[in-house]
């Protein structure tokens, strides 16, 4: 059997599938972004930049900015929660660490809708949090915790923090322990050792986890749909609306292109950062 | 100083696990709640589970979900395993890595509208088959990721030994390579089954109109939009139990499955 034939058998079916049902469809909506919307909701094959101009309308720009703000806050909060959690896991006895990590990632493998719905149960006016606070006499009236940006951020942080824990754990795990010992032997206080020796070496992990959370949050549909207030919370909802209600596919396609562009930009930045870190390790 | 900061870290970890698991446990507990009120405890009951198993739309959705998950898992496992072997043994390139990573990071909604546009362009009738075609896309990516981890941690020289002893390429693949990576393949299959059972947005967009191709997550979404009900709590408990069982077995079969 020739080498070429073997490659075709091994790579052909899988890559063919991804090419036909991922690359081509994504290419298709890329071209749709430059077409006009038909009168009855179809596509008129007339070339235009109109959709891109329209996407910068303050109304839509506002939704993009709100999505970015929510995604950014989610990312920061997720990192602040995940870092100490990952650090605590690395300090645990070796034989416990796998178990502790599995406990972190296990909820991710349950249904996303259900995990988000769980927060409707937690945050509603008669939910666990309001009931507990009222029972403790801390509040008289139930708080409005649901159907606002707060609820969306809680939902996103809940769903995505586990990824950040894994990413930071794996970069903490790669640190050369001798650098920490050297810092301590030279008399550096614990905090100095942390922010001068440990933290810089885990920047690639923070970046990888952070980019992942940001990208998944800014393009999210379910969480703002179920936990947010109003119909057009974030870009994901806007795209959904263009396809299923407004029936303006070209404009929906344009919005998707913006999402993809943001995503690729961030992934590229993260890859550069990771490469630079790897280069530095190589020089040492 | 050090002990105190370690105590703080441990406390933080405990709080983090509490944050992760309390919502899930509250949901499960309330599924056994007698009262129709979904958030206040009034006594133990299995009533809501009974209701679930007699509701025709839910049984149909469960059947559809199983069909989609089974077929897409089988296809993705075969294609993904071949692909992982091909990439690890001959074609390691960063472009391929990007293509294989893309399905995991492209926002669901973008992939969903892209597939809907594509199927519409082809004038395809939508139904369970279009959901299956779509689910294979992201399932392949996960199978590849799991099997590649497995491939990297095994000694490639036994493949050369097999070839030196005169085994054909196919025999080496079937008798040496496949048994060696089998735990990864099984774990990848279990994970892709889990993902497919739980996937909502892409199924929602590619299912077409009509009730006949509704999947369980689509049914759950419709119920959640309708309001918080004890039936959702019961269904959520069953779905989570199924997912956790599958993931548990995936981890038992391939210990490295989560250490990507």
Image (cartoon, coloured by chain):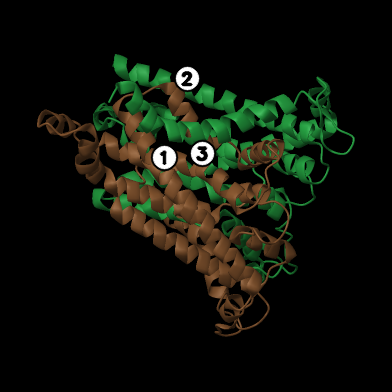
The reply to whether residue A125 is in sight is yes
Q: Secondary structure at mark 3?
A: helix
Position in image of residue A54 (x %, y %): 83, 27
- Judge depth for marks 1 and 3 and give the one in front: 1
Judge from the rendering whether residue A71 lies leftward or rightward of residue B9; answer left or right: right
Residue beneath label 1, please?
A: B79
Q: Nearer the viewer, residue A205 or B58?
A: B58
The answer to which quarter of the image holds residue B30 is bottom right
Toward the front, the furthest residue is A1
Q: Which chain is green?
A: A
Residue beneath label 2, please?
A: A272
Q: Nearer the viewer, residue B109 or A60?
A: B109
Label 1 crowd (10 A; few <14 / some 14-19 / many >=20) = many
Q: Is residue A201 above or below residue A41?
A: above
Q: CA distance from mark 2 to mark 3?
A: 20 Å
Q: Secondary structure at mark 2?
A: helix
Position in image of residue B209 (x %, y %): 73, 54
- Judge depth for marks 2 and 1 and give the one in front: 1
Position in image of residue A26 (x %, y %): 63, 30
- Residue for point 80% across, 33% down: A60
Toward the top, the furthest residue is A283
Tag 1, which chain?
A: B
Tag 2, which chain?
A: A
* Numbered disc total: 3
- Residue for point 63% across, 60% down: A117
Image quadrant holding the N terminus of chain A, namely top left
Q: CA distance from mark 1 to mark 3?
A: 17 Å
Which mark, residue B36?
Answer: none
Judge from the rendering whether residue A186 lies leftward or rightward of residue B243; answer left or right: left
Q: Which chain is brown?
A: B
Q: Secondary structure at mark 1?
A: helix
């Amino acid at each position: 059997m020739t080498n070429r034939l073997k490659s075709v058998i091994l790579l052909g079916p899988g890559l063919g599938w991804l090419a036909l049902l991922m690359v081509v469809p994504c290419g298709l909506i890329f071209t749709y972004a430059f077409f006009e919307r038909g009168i009855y909701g179809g596509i008129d094959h007339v070339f235009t930049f109109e959709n891109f101009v329209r996407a910068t309308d303050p109304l839509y720009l506002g939704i993009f900015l709100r999505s970015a703000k929510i995604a950014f806050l989610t990312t920061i909060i997720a990192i602040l929660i995940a870092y100490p959690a990952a650090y605590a896991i690395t300090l645990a006895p070796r034989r416990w660490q796998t178990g502790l990590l599995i406990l972190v990632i296990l909820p991710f493998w349950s249904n996303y809708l259900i995990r988000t719905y769980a927060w409707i149960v937690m945050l509603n006016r008669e939910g666990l949090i309001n009931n507990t606070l009222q029972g403790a006499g801390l509040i008289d009236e139930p708080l409005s915790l649901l159907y606002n940006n707060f609820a969306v951020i809680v939902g996103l942080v809940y769903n995505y923090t586990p990824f950040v824990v894994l990413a930071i754990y794996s970069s903490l795990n790669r640190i050369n322990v001798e650098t920490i010992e050297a810092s301590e032997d030279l008399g550096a206080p614990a905090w100095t050792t942390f922010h001068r020796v440990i933290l810089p070496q885990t920047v690639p992990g923070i970046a990888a986890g952070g980019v992942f959370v940001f990208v998944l949050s800014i393009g999210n549909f379910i969480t703002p749909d179920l936990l947010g207030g109003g119909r057009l919370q974030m870009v994901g909802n806007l795209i959904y609306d263009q396809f299923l209600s407004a029936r303006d596919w070209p404009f929906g396609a344009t919005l998707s292109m913006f999402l993809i562009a943001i995503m690729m930009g961030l992934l590229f930045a993260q890859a550069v950062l990771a490469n630079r870190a790897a280069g530095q390790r190589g020089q040492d | 100083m050090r002990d105190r900061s370690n105590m703080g870290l441990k406390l933080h970890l405990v709080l983090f696990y509490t944050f992760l698991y309390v919502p899930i446990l509250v949901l499960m507990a309330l599924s056994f709640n007698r009262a129709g009120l979904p958030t206040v405890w009034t006594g133990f009951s299995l009533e809501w589970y009974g209701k679930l198993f007699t509701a025709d739309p839910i049984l149909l959705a469960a059947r559809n979900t199983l069909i989609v998950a089974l077929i897409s898992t089988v296809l993705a496992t075969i294609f993904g395993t071949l692909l992982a072997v091909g990439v690890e043994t001959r074609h390691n390139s960063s472009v391929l890595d990007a293509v294989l990573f893309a399905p995991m990071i492209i926002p669901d909604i973008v992939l969903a509208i892209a597939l809907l546009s594509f199927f519409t362009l082809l004038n395809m009738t939508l139904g369970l088959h279009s959901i299956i075609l779509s689910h294979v896309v992201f399932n392949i990516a996960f199978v590849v990721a799991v099997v590649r981890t497995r491939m990297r941690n095994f000694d490639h020289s036994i493949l050369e030994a097999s070839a030196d002893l005169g085994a054909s390429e196919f025999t080496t693949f079937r008798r040496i390579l496949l048994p060696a990576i089998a735990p990864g393949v099984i774990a990848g299959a279990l994970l892709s089954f889990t993902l497919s059972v739980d996937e909502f947005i892409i199924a929602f967009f590619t299912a077409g109109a009509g009730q006949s191709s509704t999947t369980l997550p689509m049914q759950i979404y419709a119920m959640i939009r309708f309001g918080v009900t004890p039936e959702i709590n019961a269904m959520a408990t069953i779905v989570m139990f199924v997912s956790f069982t599958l993931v548990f077995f995936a981890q038992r079969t391939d210990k490295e499955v989560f250490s990507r």
